[in-house]
Image (spheres, grey):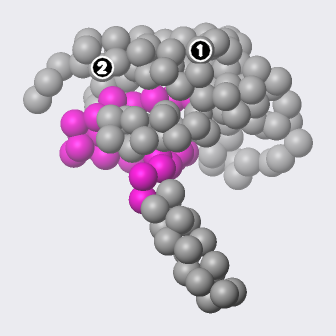
Amino acid sequence: MNRTLLACLAMLTLALSTSAAEWRTDFEAAKSEAKKDSKIIVMNFTGSDWCGFCIKMKKDTLDMKAFTDYAAKNAVLVEVDFPSRKKLPAAQAKANDALRKKFEVEGYPTFVFTDAAGKELGRHVGYLQGGPLAFIDRLEKAKGKAKTP
């Protein structure tokens, strides 16, 4: 029985990992991937370990299957983190700060949607009520502004 349970867990883990979207930290690599796959980029400017609304948005929307399934097919995800307790590598902290300045982000969470070239298509600032479907609606509107190849 233990082997059967382990086999089921292994299959479930594999199924979840293949459909789930992955958050990256390299914006330049994300642009290349978005261009190759004809996707938009979703940047999440967050204070992952101190910002209450960032943590709530992650739990209520970004970690939900409806969003991760949508994102896996339609978006390249980039986390631009400004943590308080954990230390980022110096190069990552510098890159995150450069993105914060470039996109004029002043509060968290801020979500910036861009095309594959990095041109802003839209943004959302703060917590968004309505869960993944409300957020996906915002992304669809931004996606509609992207130039098709």
Residue 119 spot, x, y in % from top left: 33, 19
What residue is at 67 percent from the left and 28 percent from the top?
Answer: 60
Q: In the drawing, does residue 36 fall left or right of residue 56?
A: left
Q: How many marks?
A: 2
Q: Is residue 110 above or below residue 116?
A: above
Residue 98 spot, x, y in % from top left: 57, 29
For disc 2, the neighbor class at 10 Å (few under 14, some 14 to 19, many from 20) is: many
**Per the image, is 33 magenta?**
yes
Span colored in magenta: 18-44
Q: Residue furthest front?
A: 1
The quarter in which the N terminus is drawn is bottom right
Question: Which residue does the numbered mark 1 point to in the structure image?
Answer: 130
For disc 1, the neighbor class at 10 Å (few under 14, some 14 to 19, many from 20) is: few
Mark seen at residue 143: 2
The quarter in which the C terminus is drawn is top left
Residue 44 spot, x, y in % from top left: 57, 29
What residue is at 63 percent from the left and 45 percent from the top?
Answer: 92
Q: Is 128 in front, or is 142? A: 128
Of the image marks 1 and 2, the number of the one nearer the N terminus: 1
